[in-house]
Every structure is written in C-alpha cells, then in structure tokens.
C-alpha cells in the first residue's frame, strides 16, 4: 500500500464503476483524494493545485492502458510541474519504445521525450 507512505495522494479514475470501490477503501483517509474524470481532459497542474496544494515533491504512479499510454505520458511530461519520479506499468512494446536507442526501428518521439 502506498497511501501510508505518501504525504498526499491523488487518485484519478475515469471509470465510474471503480469509484465506489476506491471510496469504500480510501474515502475516509485524510491523505487520499479521489477525482473522477479523464486525466487527459484536465491540466495536471490544476488537479495537483486543487487536490494536493503545497506539495514540494511530486511523483506519478500508474498502471497505464495500452491505447492511451503515450498520450498520458506526454500529458505529464509536458506539464509545468516537475515530477521527481514517474513509475508506470505498461505494455512491453511501449516500454521498448521508451528505451529504444537512436536508429532502432522503434526509436521515435517517445524515445526522445524520455531522455
């Protein structure tokens, strides 16, 4: 469990069917905040400032769906907030693109952005 070690934690969930479970498990915890919505439709800086203001060190932890892994990663990388660590679970193919060396077949924009 990460919530006991986190100062403040913001959970962003797009699927309405998961909200009751998140609320049941974490809704009474003072340091856990649950936001229902599509992260791609909300500026990261605005969510952080609204739900966990005053934070000095930001980290991003997620299990990313394959079809939106790249857009979500860019959403965070392009945010004006600095994230000291991004920890994500993703499909192997996307991970290989992240670490692809220059000249490799799978080298591209995601490889460059991850430098």
Image (cartoon, rainbow, N blue to C red):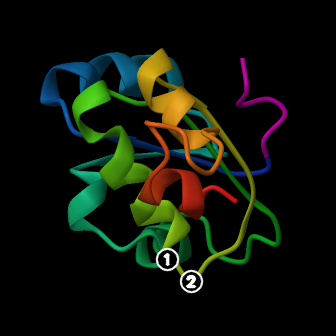
Q: Residue at x 26, y 40 (%)?
A: 68
Where disc 1 sits, the SS reads: helix
Residue 114 visible at all? yes
Q: Quadrant of the N terminus?
A: top right
Question: Which residues are drawn in magenta?
Answer: 1-6
**Do the CB atoms of the residues marked 1 and 2 lie less than 8 Å apart?**
yes
90 on left or right of 40? right
Percent across and percent down for residue 75 are 40, 64
Instruction: Please say whether residue 69 is one of the residues in the magenta stretch.
Output: no
Up the image or down, 60 lies above or below 69; here it is: below
Which badge, 1 or 2, is on the more N-terminal residue? 1
Q: Magenta residues: mostly which secondary structure?
A: loop
Residue occupying the far front of the picture: 103
Residue 63 visible at all? no
Up the image or down, 46 lies above or below 114; here it is: below
Residue bearing the label numbered 1:
45
Residue 45 or residue 111, whichever sits in front: 111
Q: CA distance from mark 1 to mark 2?
A: 7 Å
52 on left or right of 63? right
Percent across and percent down for residue 103 are 56, 48
Q: Residue at x 57, y 61 (%)?
A: 112
Up the image or down, 21 lies above or below 108; here it is: above
Q: Residue 87, located in which quarter of the rendered image?
A: top right
Residue bearing the label numbered 2:
80
Q: Residue at x 56, y 83 (%)?
A: 80
Percent across and percent down for residue 49 are 54, 77
Residue 83 or residue 49, whichever sits in front: 83
Where disc 2 sits, the SS reads: loop
Q: Residue at x 22, y 50 (%)?
A: 37
């Amino acid at each position: 469990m990460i919530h006991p070690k986190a100062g403040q934690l913001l959970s962003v969930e797009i699927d309405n069917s998961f909200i009751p479970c998140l609320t049941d498990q974490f809704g009474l915890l003072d340091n856990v905040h649950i936001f229902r919505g599509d992260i791609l439709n909300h500026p990261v800086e605005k969510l952080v400032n609204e739900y966990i203001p005053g934070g000095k060190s930001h980290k991003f932890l997620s299990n990313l769906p394959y079809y939106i892994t790249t857009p979500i990663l860019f959403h965070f990388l392009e945010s004006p907030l600095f994230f000291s660590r991004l920890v994500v679970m993703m499909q192997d193919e996307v991970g290989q693109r992240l670490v692809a060396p220059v000249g490799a077949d799978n080298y591209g924009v995601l490889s460059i952005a991850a430098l």
